[in-house]
Structure formats: structure tokens, C-alpha cells
Amino acid sequence: MSIGGKIGRIVLAAAIACAPGAVPAQAADAPVGGGMLHYGGSKQVELGIGKSMVVELPRDASEVIVADPKIANAVVRSARRAFLIGVAGGATSIIFIDAQGQQIVALDVVVARDVGALQASLRTILPESPIDVRSVGDSIMVTGSVRSAQDAQTAVALAGQFVGDPAKVINSLAVTERDQVLLKVTVAEVQRNIAKQLGINWDAAYQIGTTIIGGGSNPGFAFGDALANIIDPTTGNVIAGGNGIGAAFQNSRGEGAVNLRALEENGVMRTLAEPNLTAISGETAQFLAGGEFPVPTGRTCTPDNGCNVSIEFKKFGVSLGFTPVVLTGGRISLKVNTEVSELSNEGAFTQTDGFTIPSLRVRRADTTVEVPSGGAIALAGMIQQSTRQAMAGIPGAKDIPIIGTLFRSRDFLKAETELVIFVTPYIAKATRPDAMARPDDGFITSSDGEAYFLGRMNKVYGIRPTDASQVGFIVD
């Protein structure tokens, strides 16, 4: 009897059990998935979830006992025929009893997922990878070997779609050819700052009795005698600077003052970091070149021991973390997290006890990209420009054409920042140790005489002269 190709049939025949040459006793406990089953004792039956099986009994059954209907159920169609239906993953028992109360057959039913369709799909999609799929309760275990991490991800993703929940997929695949990826990251930044001041600042003071009447003009943001009072518009912090050119004029009584100030300052700062890191495809690697600085997180005070400060260390420097996955065609999927940070007094916090907590100036990028081996891509970039200008002077007089220049002061500040982050991945292969270059190759510390008299920190070698011979050329 055939029922849709998905319904198995178990025929329980007493005549076969009594016939000569019957199956030995040890075969009675073997798992049964179809064909003929001898009744009596305990039989093991495997069912798929949502699958059914026909059971034919040798004599009439009057009772059916199902231990756990949530796992498997039995539907009696006639006195000698019943249907077993797999409901959920697990194991249960089904017992058939006749009118005299005698056991006809006891079935140990194991319900698991039918992975035949998944196995066929994996063989079609990954024909060169020997993958085996097994059902473990309500989950699926994928075993075998694949050629790359991408093939492993494909197999696990397909199994997750089949189960309906990726968390129920047990990945036991082994990658036979695991590539190594070398990642080179370049973080380059250039900052330019320009500050200018030119003008005349008038101050006057007149004393009438014990009362002083003052007047004057001040710039929009004070320079004083230095650039140390200028606020950087890009960061909101103070810019350190130098003194400008100034002149002051007073009468003999010191009742009036005229200050002439002229100042201009240009500043350029360049930051470059190139961390390199190698990791196996599918694994995560971390790199940090820098240090840690203490940050107070709390204070505990007791009458006996006084106050103790809790310290937490924060990392700074050049850090790189990435997870590469080598794809087909030499392409590499990268999950990159790179950061360049440095200690700074800009925005630092000073406590009441005088303890100063420095701040961090950070350039960070965290993203996922796909790049061919040896190809470069701009991971992140930024261009920022900020300009501030202030003009102050004596009201009315500063607005007079040409002459008003003597009664006003102009302050100008401009800041520009350009930042770019590049990444270049390579599929790396191992090489001989002597083919690797070290930073200290050829470095020899200079002697005391070379250091004192010649000012050399290390030995300097010249190029050995060679004769102009015919070596290496073919002469007719």
C-alpha cells in the first residue's frame, strides 16, 4: 500500500513470528522505519514531524494507549489498522491491547525532523562539500567539512531557514581551507589653524575726586597679549599660542592709553597611524598600541581608613579590531572597528582636590564593507571648516571710512580639519622567516667616540665602490 510517498507501512503478522527462520531476538529492538515489523516486545519506530505511518495489527485491538499525545498520536481506522502521526520532536510510547487485555505490540516512537529535503538541497548547492545533516530532537546538527567559511555560512543559513529558527541549528562543520587575511588601515589627519589680529584699542581714565570714569574699546574675543585666550570654534577649547606685537602710549599722568596690537599665527598638525593585523577567515582579531590612564569612578569613606578612591583604567592609542570572511572570487567581507585616540587637556576635568582627569581626542570608525583582496576603500572621511571673526571699536568713530581704522580692532580665527581612513585587505600566505624585514635590521648603536665627536646615534655605512668592468654584459 502506498500513501502519497510520505506514509510508511508497518505490517504486524503473527504468522511470520511463528514461521521457521524468524528474525533473531536481538533484531527485535532495531529501529524500524518501514517494511515488516514482528509484533510482541518493544519496537522502535522513527517518525518525522508532520509525517504519518500505517500500522496493521495481526488481531483486533480494543484499546490504544498513547503516553504523550503532544509528541505522537495514534488514529484507529479499524480494529486492525491504525495511523501513527508525528506531532513534535521527542520520544513516547504507544501500546495496542486486545479484548482479553493482552498486549498486541508496544511501540517506542521517536519523532524527529525529516532532514531528507535539506540534505538534498545541500548536495545541490555545495556539491563538493561532504555535509551530513542529523536531527537532534527539535534541532538540527550539521556535520562534515566545507572548503571555506562562506560555504559554512551558506549551509548553516539554509539549515536555519529549514528549521525556522537559526538558534536550533548546531554547527559542527570543519573548514578545510581557512584563509588568512592581512588588514592594513591608514588613518591620516591634517589640521590647519590661522589666527590674526590687527587694530588699535583705546583706553582712557579720568579721575574726578575719588571717582574714576573709564572708557575704551575691547575686541570681540580678547587676545590680550597672546593667543592663549582664543577659543577654537571646532572644539570649543583654548588654543595655545604666542605673544603678538604691541605698543602702548600714555601721557605723563597715566590718564589715557592707546594700545596698538598686531598678531598673526599659523599652525599645522599632521596625524598618521597605520596599524596592520592578520586573522583567520571567520575569526576576530584585536590590536592596541597605546596605554591606559586612570579615571576615578567613586569614593568610599570610612571613619577608620579615611577615603579610598575607586579607579577604572581607560584605553587610548591606536586600536584595530576586525572580523574577515573570505568569499568566493577572492573578495573579503570585513567588519572593521578602528580608533586613534590621544590624551588631551582640551575638555579636561579638574576636581576640587586638584586632581585633573584628561580627556580623549578620538577618531573612530565602525562599519562592514566588502573589498577584493589587494583593493583599497575609503572607510570614513571628514572635512570640517570653521571661521570666526569679530570687530570692535569706539561707536561712531570706527565706522568712518579710512580714519575709522584707527578706532577699531579686528580679530580673525579659521580652523580646518581633514580626516580620512583607508582599509586594504590582503589574503596572506605564510613565507620563510628570512624573507621578513624587521625595523631594526642593520641597526648598530654608535660608539662613544662617534656619539661625542660626530653626533651620531648609530653607525653610518657608505656604499662600497665597484669597478666599471664588463661583468653582467655580453660582449661580441
Image: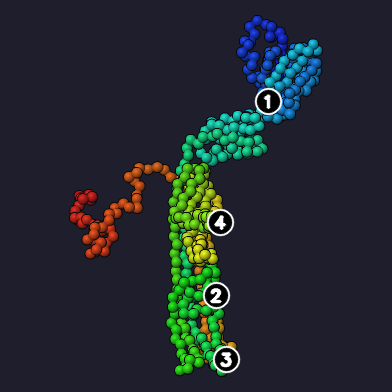
Earlier sequence position, callout 4 versus callout 1: 1
Residue 467 spot, x, y in % from top left = 19, 55
Image position, residue 441 (x, y; %): 31, 51
Please name which of the two marks, 3 or 1, marks the residue nearer to the observer. Answer: 3
Task: Compare marks 2 and 3 and give the one earlier in the sequence.
Answer: 3
Could you tell me if the residues under marks 4 and 3 are in contact, i.e. CB atoms within 8 Å?
no
In this orientation, which residue lies closer to the viewer: 259 or 412?
259
Which residue is pictured at 20% across the width and 55% down the height?
Answer: 466
CA gap between label 1 and label 2 equals 78 Å
| Within-10-Å neighbours for mark 2: few <14, some 14–19, many 20+ | some
Q: Is residue 41 above or below residue 298?
A: above
- Amino acid on which the number 3 mark rests in the picture: Thr
Real-space Cα distance between discs 4 and 2?
A: 54 Å
Image coordinates for residue 101, horizontal then vertical, percent: 78, 13
- Label 3 secondary element: strand
Which residue was labeled with disc 3? 211
**Residue farthest to the top?**
20
Horizontally, is 263 left or right of 369 in the view? Answer: left
Q: Amino acid at mark 1?
A: Ala
Residue receiving disc 2: 388
Tag 2 near tag 3, CB within 8 Å: no
Q: Is label 1 in a helix, a strand or a loop?
A: strand
Quadrant in which the N terminus appears: top right
The amino acid at mark 2 is Arg
Q: Residues within 10 Å of mark 1 (few under 14, many from 20)?
A: many
Query: Quarter-wise, where is residue 46 in the image?
Result: top right
Upstream in sequence: badge 4 or badge 2: 4
Residue drawn at (52%, 44%), measured in percent from left and top?
Answer: 325
